[in-house]
């Protein structure tokens, strides 16, 4: 028969191990998300370099106007000027809402 003290020690050890594992999972998740974010930035910079080689870097993908230098310094891989980016984001949000509302309902 197990004593209360032994059960308490096991529960305490279990709690410590759970906390350790959860912390490690958090660290690994954060590291993976960082690597994914970095790889996306790397791909975008590669695209920006190709656009530079093609002579179209710094020009808005939508309207063709020049993207202001401050925006390019902040986001060197920007494809759109501020106004076109805002319009693009609103359109994406509308599309996402439309897809969500038109999705079939499942029981």
Image (tube, rainbow, N blue to C red):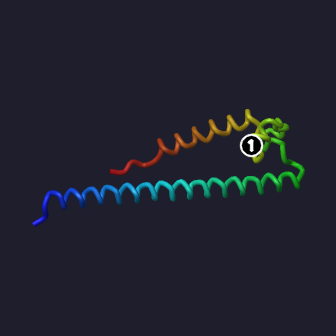
Q: Is residue 54 left or right of residue 73?
A: right
Residue 81 vertical placement versus 14 (above, below) = above
- Number of numbered discs on residues: 1
Task: From the top left corner, tell me how far across and down residue 70 is, in percent.
Answer: 80, 35
Residue at the spot of label 1:
75
Q: Secondary structure at mark 1?
A: loop
Tell me the quarter of the picture where residue 40 sits. bottom right
Q: Nearer the viewer, residue 81 or 44?
A: 44
Task: From the top left corner, tell me how far across and down residue 39 is, in percent.
Answer: 67, 58
Residue 31 vertical placement versus 60 (above, below) = below
Residue with the most extreme front position: 5
- x 29%, y 59%: residue: 14
Q: Nearer the viewer, residue 21 or 8?
A: 8
Task: From the top left corner, tell me how far across and down residue 33 is, in percent.
Answer: 57, 55
Tell me the quarter of the picture where residue 22 sits. bottom left
Residues packed near mark 1 inside 10 Å, few (<14), some (14 to 19) or many (20 plus)? few
Tell me the quarter of the picture where residue 80 sits. top right
Task: From the top left corner, tell me how far across and down residue 41 is, in percent.
Answer: 70, 53
């Amino acid at each position: 028969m197990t004593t209360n003290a032994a059960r308490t020690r096991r529960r305490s050890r279990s709690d410590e191990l759970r906390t350790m594992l959860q912390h490690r999972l958090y660290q690994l998740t954060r590291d993976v998300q960082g690597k994914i974010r970095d790889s996306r930035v790397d791909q975008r910079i590669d695209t920006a370099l190709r656009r530079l080689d093609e002579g179209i870097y710094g020009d808005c993908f939508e309207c063709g106007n020049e993207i202001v230098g401050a925006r390019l310094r902040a986001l060197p891989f920007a494809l759109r000027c501020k106004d076109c980016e805002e319009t693009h984001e609103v359109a994406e949000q509308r599309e996402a809402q439309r897809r969500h509302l038109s999705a079939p309902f499942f029981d």
